[in-house]
Image (spheres, coloured by chain):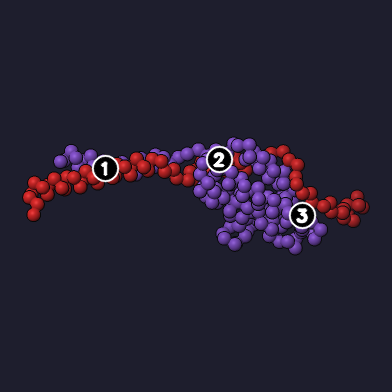
Chain colours: A purple, B red
C-alpha cells in the first residue's frame, strides 16, 4: 500500500511537468504566401515611412497601422494614404492568419496579432506614434 | 451491508480508477501545445527585420507628387 501511495503521488506531481514539457514549439514563418506578404508590406513601408515619421500614422497594439492625424496629410494625398493603410492592414492581418495557419493553429491568430503588435512597437524607430495602452497614443 | 473486506476492495478499486484517470489526463495533456510566446516573439522579430531591411518591392498605390515649395525653387 505504501508503494502504491508513493506511485500515486509521483503520478500526481509528474503530470504538470509532462504538461509543461510540451510548451515549447518553434513557429514556422517560411512559406511562399508569407514571403509574398512580407515583400508587399516592405514595399509599402517605403511609401508610408514619411507618414510614420510625420506622426500622421502610427502603430496599434494589435499589429496594425492607424491614421492618427488626417489633417496632417495634404488633402490631395489623404485618399492615397488611406488606401495604403487599408492595404497594409489587410496584408498584416493576412500575415498573422498565414503564420497561424502554417503552424496548424488558426486559434493562435489573436495571440500572434498581440505579439506582433508588441514587437512592431518595440522595433519601431524613435519618434513614431505608438498605441501605448488601448486608445492611448504616445510618441516613441 | 458490506463487510470490511468488501469495503477495502471497493476503496482499492476506486483508487485504481482515480489513478487511471490521472494517468490518462497526463497522456492527453501531451497533445496540448500552448501558444509559444518566446518562439512567437523571435519569429515576429525575424519577420519585422525582413520587412524593415527588405528592398522595396513594387507598390500598389503611389502617393501623388507634391509640387516643390518656393524655397526649393530658389535654390
Q: Alpha-carbon distance for marks 2 and 3?
A: 32 Å
Asked if one can make out residue A37 in the rendered structure from this viewpoint, the answer is: yes
Same chain shared by disc 2 and disc 1: no
Identify the residue at horizontal 59%, vertical 39% (top origin): B46
Q: Chain of mark 1?
A: B
Describe the element under mark 2 as helix, strand or loop. Answer: helix
Depth order, front residue of A46/A2? A2
Residue that numbered label 3 is attached to: A80
Q: Chain of mark 3?
A: A
Numbered circles on residues, count: 3
Residue that numbered label 2 is attached to: A102
Q: Chain of mark 2?
A: A
Select label 2 or label 3 by which is in front.
2
Describe the element under mark 3 as helix, strand or loop. Answer: helix
Identify the residue at horizontal 7%, vertical 49% (top origin): B4
- Which x, y percent locates residue A25? 47, 39
Left or right, B55 with respect to A24, comes to right
Left or right, A40 with respect to B19, comes to right
Amino acid at each position: 500500500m505504501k508503494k502504491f501511495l508513493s506511485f500515486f503521488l509521483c503520478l500526481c506531481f509528474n503530470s504538470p511537468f509532462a504538461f509543461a514539457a510540451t510548451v515549447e514549439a518553434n513557429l514556422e514563418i517560411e512559406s511562399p504566401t508569407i514571403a509574398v506578404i512580407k515583400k508587399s508590406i516592405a514595399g509599402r513601408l517605403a511609401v508610408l515611412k514619411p507618414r510614420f515619421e510625420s506622426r500622421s500614422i502610427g502603430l496599434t497594439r494589435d499589429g496594425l497601422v492607424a491614421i492618427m492625424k488626417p489633417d496632417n496629410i495634404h488633402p490631395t494625398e489623404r485618399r492615397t494614404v488611406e488606401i495604403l493603410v487599408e492595404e497594409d492592414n489587410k496584408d498584416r492581418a493576412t500575415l498573422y492568419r498565414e503564420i497561424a495557419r502554417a503552424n496548424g493553429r488558426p486559434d493562435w491568430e489573436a495571440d500572434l496579432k498581440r505579439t506582433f503588435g508588441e514587437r512592431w512597437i518595440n522595433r519601431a524607430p524613435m519618434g513614431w506614434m505608438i498605441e501605448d495602452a488601448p486608445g492611448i497614443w504616445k510618441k516613441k | 451491508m458490506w463487510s470490511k473486506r468488501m469495503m477495502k476492495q471497493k476503496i482499492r478499486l476506486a483508487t485504481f480508477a482515480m489513478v487511471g484517470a490521472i494517468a490518462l489526463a497526463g497522456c492527453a495533456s501531451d497533445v496540448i501545445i500552448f501558444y509559444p510566446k518566446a518562439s512567437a516573439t523571435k519569429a515576429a522579430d525575424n519577420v519585422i527585420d525582413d520587412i524593415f531591411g527588405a528592398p522595396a518591392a513594387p507598390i500598389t498605390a503611389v502617393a501623388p507628387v507634391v509640387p516643390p515649395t518656393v524655397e526649393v525653387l530658389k535654390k
